[in-house]
Image: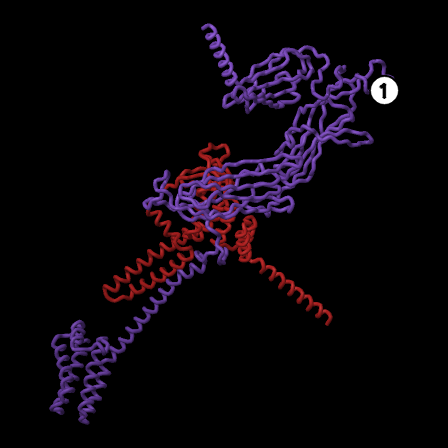
Chain colours: A red, B purple
Amino acid sequence: MKDLAYKLTQILFTFILSWIFTFSGLAQTPESWVEKGNKAYTKGRFNQAVECYQNSLKSGKESSSLYYNLGNAYFRLGNISSAILNYERAKRLNPYNEDINLNLEIANRKIIDKIEVVPQLFFIHWWNTLSVLLPVDFWAVLSIIFSLFFFLFLFFYLIAQGYFGRRRAFRLFTLSLILGLICYHFADKQHDRFTNSKEAIIFSPTVNVKSSPDEKGTDKFVIHEGSKVILLDDFNNWFKIKIANGSVGWVEKDVMEII
Amino acid sequence: MKTNIITRLISGLLLFISTVLYAQEPKLTLSAPSTVSSGQAFQVTFSVNAQGSGFRGPTFKGFDVLSGPNQSISSSSQISNGAYIQSINLSFIYYIQAPAEGTYTIGPASIKVGGKVLESNSATIKVVKGQAPQQNQAGRQSHPQQQVQQGGTLGANDVFVKAFVNKNNPIKGEQVIVTYKIYRQVQIAQLSLTKLPSNKGFWAEDLVEENKNPKQTTEYINGKQYAVTEIRKVALFPQESGKLTVDPLELDIWALIQAQRKRGNSIFDMFFDDPFSNTTQTVKKKLVSNALSINVRPLPAATQPNNYTGAVGNFTFRSSIDKKDLKANEAITFKYTISGSGNIKLIDKLTPLFPPDFEVYDPKITDNIQHTENGVSGTKTFEYLVIPRTAGIYKVQPVSFSYYDLGKNSYVTLNSQEYTINVAKGDPNSEGMGFSATNQEDIKYLSNDIEHIKTKPFKLNPKGSFFFQTPLYWLFLILPLGFFAIAVIIRRKNIKRRSDLNLIRNRKATRTSKKKLRKAEIFLKKNEVSKFYDEIAHALWGYLSDKFMIPLSELSMDSVNEALCTKNVREDIVSDFIKALNHCEFARFAPGDSSRNMHEVYREALEIISKTERELR
């Protein structure tokens, strides 16, 4: 009897404790960190704002707005590289937000390097623009819808009586197949940018870009903090990078932060 | 005639002299003794007979400058013959001393008089081996003849220099007053500062530079009486936080001490030293003050206002404006004055925000700073000349000035007044850009700032969680294929079943029709005309429907014709069948000679069905 009472108290105690912990945990949700960060930012305490947003990110959750706010806080602190990094992350999640693009542009005007962008062929540009028009999962769902249409029209094609009915069904299932493949391609293209990012922001004040992945390699050109680079290849502790004007070279991995 | 000439000559001469008096050429002259003895202090004077400014002293190579330049000015004016003559004598006096013998040249000095730079002559001075250095300073001439014995005894405690600081733990930017005092038990003939502290990490302001009447007090240390004189007072403003050191001050003094008798060192001699005898001697001694260590606290960073530029002290802030109503293209002056005590000299800018249509010139900054015993105070005035270029009513935002208040130990932000400026349309012919309706301006972007953060609550999604390429995604992608396959299979089965059904109907077609004909035979016998014809029609139509798989609804004379033709039924049989159908339908809806017709129709139907049956086999 006494034993049972003891056990019951123990269980009750553990229950209460866990309950308290859950509640204190609730008080520090990523959302509450964001709110705290916003308050600190509005009051001009940007250091504190950065800390709060970072804490929110530590939860493993993200949002383009959160990256955008963090970028703003860094911008106010004068840390342009970090600001650009976070604006780029925000932009990847939400490519057509005016605020994000404007702030990224302003931040990019503050960096040292002014790299002339090689213009893309117009159809490649359109293609890329189209591919980021919708988020990954939108394209994924569309590809499923088109797959559904494809099989539906294929079936119609098979059962259709008469020449005209068959011809219409044929056209529709071919169109669905093509659109479905395009959607899949766009989803895959964007998905790749998230899971296997090929872009980075330079964080070291000055970086000598070498002609080979070797410290003794010849210096090809110099880039400065805040510049965006595209990663082409990696070898040991080196990345082969390409900058917006098309120049290519090798830099050490620790001078940059992958977007 | 002759006297006339003479008087003329004289008057001419007089005239000449008077013009000379008027146009007295300003001249800078150097006067110095041509021969001095080493160690002797002597006077070098540069004098100019006009009001001048920007005196630049010569380099005294080979000499030690004991003091100077000491400026003195004397002016006299007189009115003679109705002419006002003023003569000014400005002189700069140096007391210098040659430590070693030889021949030295004192280079020329220069001064600006009326925009012209005058240069003095230079002098060559021969320094011969020293006798007693002559005491030239006024008031110290009580001992005309002095014996000199270099290296005479002067105890370490007889004379020393100490540095004092009024605050050991100031905040960054707060003024700290350092006082150097000389303690002495002997008389000092003269002193010269040889090394001024560099005061690294501080901004220094000399207080009471021309210390004409030094403060003199008496203090007792270890039972000994010392005469204490303040020799230097400096206000220091720490420019960085942390531990800062004030370097020691170095100076040379010439002390007057009682010369020791050459006769012996007997202790009794001390008693017989007559202080009133003339046996004093001058002894030179180098004194070094103590170094000071000052621990500077940093300014609190957390509460620091955005516009804070480093002012520390106690200030007031005023603003004024010379007019409020004006026409476009007219100038207006904004005056902002900061006054108080503290590091006022270091306040270098205000950031007033004028409307963008105002043309703003660089401010005129005037300082009026007093150095007193208690530190540095004064006023600083920023005058902004502003020209509004277009008409309108403008608001000039208040300018804020922040400083760290030492009394309150916190930052204080003072705001000036807000001004409303009423600018009327300017004169269209006035210079500059006149107002005209055709003059369009681009929108002025005042700043290129980032957009504000997103303050509305937003949804946070788990990082890198995509539906794409998950097993569920693949499943959904493949699912339509499954549906497709199922649909195809169902359709196949359906087709097969239907064809089976048709086969059965085909087989049963003759039997069904015969059954119906038998039924018709019964109605014939009973003479039930309408029922008989119905049954015959059913039998014929039903036979066709079952045999040729034509739905009953689609049956017509044409479709029957077509169906039979496609099945390669002979033409006469087809026409017979259609004839039979026609007869039946005709008899059905137009009853006439019923009994004979009924028999005929019955026979015809029976015949055509068996005929077709035979044909299809």
Please state if A174 lies on the left or on the right of B587 as rendered: right
Please state if B253 lies on the left or on the right of A177 as rendered: right
Residue that extends furthest to the top in the rendered view of this protein: B2
Camera-side residue: B118 or B580?
A: B118
* Percent coordinates x, y for residue B458 in the rendering: 48, 58
Q: Which residue is mark 1?
A: B270
Q: In the rendered image, is residue B381 in sight?
A: yes
> Chain ID for label 1?
B
Q: Quadrant of residue B315?
A: top right
Q: Quadrant of the N terminus of chain A?
A: bottom right
Please state if B282 lies on the left or on the right of A70 as rendered: right
* Percent coordinates x, y for residue B418 in the rendering: 50, 48
Residue under the image location 59 percent in, 35 percent down: B369
Q: In the rendered image, is residue A242 in sight?
A: no
* Percent coordinates x, y for residue B300 in the rendering: 62, 45
Camera-side residue: B518 or B429?
A: B429
Camera-side residue: B434 or B77?
A: B77
* Percent coordinates x, y for residue B35 in the rendering: 65, 11
Q: Residues within 10 Å of mark 1 (few under 14, many from 20)?
A: few
